[in-house]
Amino acid sequence: EDQVTQSPEALRLQEGESSSLNCSYTVSGLRGLFWYRQDPGKGPEFLFTLYSAGEEKEKERLKATLTKKESFLHITAPKPEDSATYLCAVQARSGSEKLVFGKGTKLTVNP
Amino acid sequence: ETGVTQSPTHLIKTRGQQVTLRCSSQSGHNTVSWYQQALGQGPQFIFQYYREEENGRGNFPPRFSGLQFPNYSSELNVNALELDDSALYLCASTRGGEQYFGPGTRLTVT
């Protein structure tokens, strides 16, 4: 069964304090690994898709990387507006295009 | 802007009742997926439709059913509501291999 585990569950940072969020996964043939940002009470906002080990993608202060077993979301010099829950999901190569999500990491950035 | 809209925004129902949630996406987005997100959890896959046919289903009972229409709108129907059905229900349409979510419908069952 496809599975995603995210750590830590919650993370508090000071503005400007860089850190990383972890997403460990098991999947029967990876089609893609997805990162989303979710604000309270709202739908997830798409950030990145990674398809193969070694791939990296960047957007503003965020950088996502992928290995065969895990993905990291690096946050450089975060600002309070980066506070949100970050969700990781995997999609298997076979079957439907369903996403299997982790529980997320709740990030709080204090000014 | 994802181009995915959902209605209603909030809904309160009583246990045992039935509910219909609606989703609308942009022209050409042939795949729509529905997810249930309980408080503090990640979204759980309910089912997916491609060109009006069910294309995959998660571990949800048959009282969860859906429809997709030719105008790229979709419905999620839940019969015999239970207290545990209280959650945020998310609709997502696929574009370029990526799923873009709507704002969700918050369902409370009392």
Image (cartoon, coloured by chain):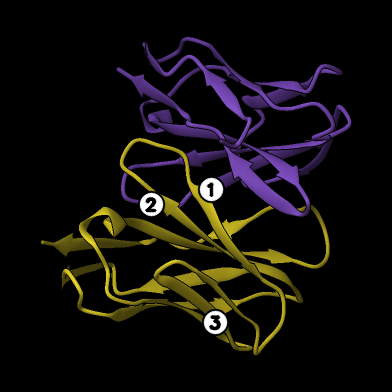
Task: From this view, report whether residue B25 is shown above or below residue A1.
Answer: above
Secondary-structure class at tag 1: strand
Check if mark 3's residue and mark 1's residue have beta carbons within 8 Å.
no
Secondary-structure class at tag 2: loop
- According to the image, label 2 marks what residue? B41
Residue B49 in percent (x, y) is at 79, 35
The type of residue carrying mark 2 is: Gln
User: Residue at (74%, 27%) from the top-left corner?
Assistant: B26
Return the chain for callout 2. B
User: Which hue belongs to chain B?
Assistant: purple
Secondary-structure class at tag 3: strand
Graded by Cα atoms within 10 Å as few (under 14), some (14 to 19) or many (20 or more), the crowding at tag 1 reads many
The residues bearing labels 3 and 2 have C-alpha atoms spaced at a distance of: 23 Å
Q: Which chain is yellow?
A: A
- According to the image, label 3 marks what residue? A65
Between A103 and B103, the one lying in front of the other is B103
- Position of residue A85 in the picture relative to residue A100 (left or right): left
User: Residue at (56%, 35%) from the top-left corner?
Assistant: B1
Task: From this view, report whether residue A111 is shown above or below residue B25.
Answer: below
Residue B107 in percent (x, y) is at 40, 23
Residue B104 in percent (x, y) is at 48, 30
User: Residue at (46%, 39%) from the top-left corner?
Assistant: A43
The image quadrant where one finds the N terminus of chain A is bottom right
Name, please, the residue furthest toward the front: A60
Check if mark 2's residue and mark 1's residue have beta carbons within 8 Å.
yes
Graded by Cα atoms within 10 Å as few (under 14), some (14 to 19) or many (20 or more), the crowding at tag 2 reads some
The image quadrant where one finds the C terminus of chain A is bottom left
The residues bearing labels 2 and 1 have C-alpha atoms spaced at a distance of: 8 Å
Check if mark 3's residue and mark 2's residue have beta carbons within 8 Å.
no
Return the chain for callout 3. A
- According to the image, label 1 marks what residue? B44
